[in-house]
Image (cartoon, rainbow, N blue to C red):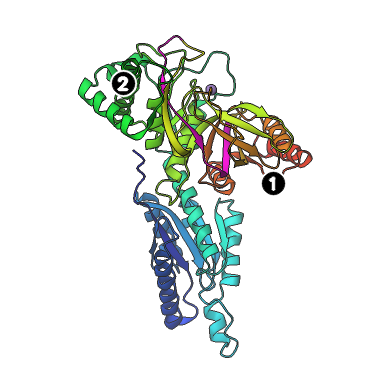
Amino acid sequence: MITGKNYKFWFCTGSQDLYGDECLAHVAEHAKIIVAKLNESGVLPYEVVWKPTLITNELIRKTFNEANVDEECAGVITWMHTFSPAKSWILGLQEYRKPLLHLHTQFNEEIPYDTIDMDFMNENQSAHGDREYGHIVSRMKIERKVVVGHWSDPAVQEKIASWMRTAVGVIESSHIRVMRVADNMRNVAVTEGDKVEAQLKFGWEVDTWPVNEIAESVAAVSEADTNALVEEYYSKYEILLEGRDPAEFRRHVAVQAQIELGFERFLEEKNYQAIVTHFGDLGALKQLPGLAIQRLMEKGYGFGAEGDWKVAAMVRLMKIMTAGKKDANGTSMLEDYTYNFVKGKEGILQAHMLEICPSIADGPISIKCQPLSMGDREDPARLVFTSKEGKGIATSLIDLGNRFRLIINDVDCRKVEKPMPKLPVATNFWTPQPDLYTGAEAWILAGGAHHTAFTYDLTAEQMGDWADAMGIEAVYIDKDTNIRDFKRDLKLGELFYR
Ligand code: MN
């Protein structure tokens, strides 16, 4: 289901006619070469499209408005090859509504010491042309990303690539529709929030559906379709009977296959990309959706448990931001469960009742059927695995009553020391940066939730830039965090975002 459009980014070069047609011809030629080389680099996840050089306020305004209405355009990259008087940009920038990157580069990498003259200086003056342009964007308080360096530098290309995924997150956020088939778990605070404000800020539509309508869709799935999917499960995953009768086990698995198909059809028909469930509100469903939800998350659906629509939307957002990423390691909802406080081995065991996305799995994936300690249904089938090692980010979007805050924690995922044979759920295990003690203290001071939207495939910078674009506060917990500064940042946020 992970879709996302075939997005493109426009490359708009600023200049003026003061230096004559020959200079303008060079400007256009240089920009075309840069665009071609960026596209050939293989680093960028989306195509860059060259646009005619912008030298008048009429053309600038027209180009930005065309970018606004072009459904495939996810953002504009701007670069001032020569000096481009920034008043010409005001109206266009005022009317522009999509992500903006200011690529502060120049065509030549090295100063041509032997040949440089004033003609060269006038033609290649990004160093001050981009400052004039940057001034007006700052004065207008427009969110943009600034990337500095030579366009052929792989590090610069990586930064452009990274920003492109943020930009797609900004554009796609307003296409996220969350289906709630249950309200929030009774008395739970942090999973609550203002859904109208979320639509105003992020563009998310969060709708409630009676659980039995989706249960009817499940019941309508034919036995043949269900059996075919069960076959797929049995060929793909290890079956851990653990003493259960094979036929009974298979019947339990079939319930999840039927749920997967019924849910998927219902979500597709109603155009939702994320779903929330609640173990205490299952209507006619025979089991809490476990394996079924795990498979849907792997296909790109967002998910939040116990009515947690914010996490559902965030997981979907991260799925679409990372779509098509080479060597992606996965994205999932997770929940902080249990600590290891042994010195030198500190970390947090991450899990949930069932619903962890197999995209983060490392090694074999098994199916188990086990009773749930909560709820009143059949023993649900679920996928069990451990997760990859490596760096990731855990995020929590919270509603503080008058505004949203996104908390972003760099975490280091690793294997637990020993297998946990009696634990019938998928797990991850991580140490928050800068260390468990500081990381958890900062998280709690910031009001972060127990549910997180986690990914190996995005950076704190990308999610922070997304939050900036949405006009909400982002706080970072990383290798540089210390509690005194962090508390001051929270206080400053109270002032800035009130
Ligand atoms: Mn939970």
184 lies above or below 321: above
Q: Amino acid at mark 1?
A: Lys
Furthest residue toward bottom: 114
Disc 1: which residue = 479
- Residue 336's quadrant in the figure? top right
3D distance between C-alphas at marks 1 and 2? 46 Å
Q: Is residue 240 visible?
A: yes
* Rendered location of residue 375, percent (x, y): 47, 11
Q: What is the quadrant of the N terminus in the image?
A: top left
Q: Are marks 1 and 2 in contact (CB under 8 Å)?
A: no
The answer to whether residue 200 is seen in the rendering is: no
Crowding near pointer 1: few (<14 within 10 Å), some, many (20+)?
some
The residue that label 2 is drawn on is: 254
Above or below, 449 against 299 in this view is: above
Residue drawn where x is 67% and y is 44% of the image:
478
Q: Which amino acid type is shown beneath numbered disc 2?
A: Ala
Left/right of residue 106 with respect to residue 33 in the rendered view: right
Vertical relation: 480 (above or below) 76 = above
- Residue nearer the viewer, 310 or 158: 158
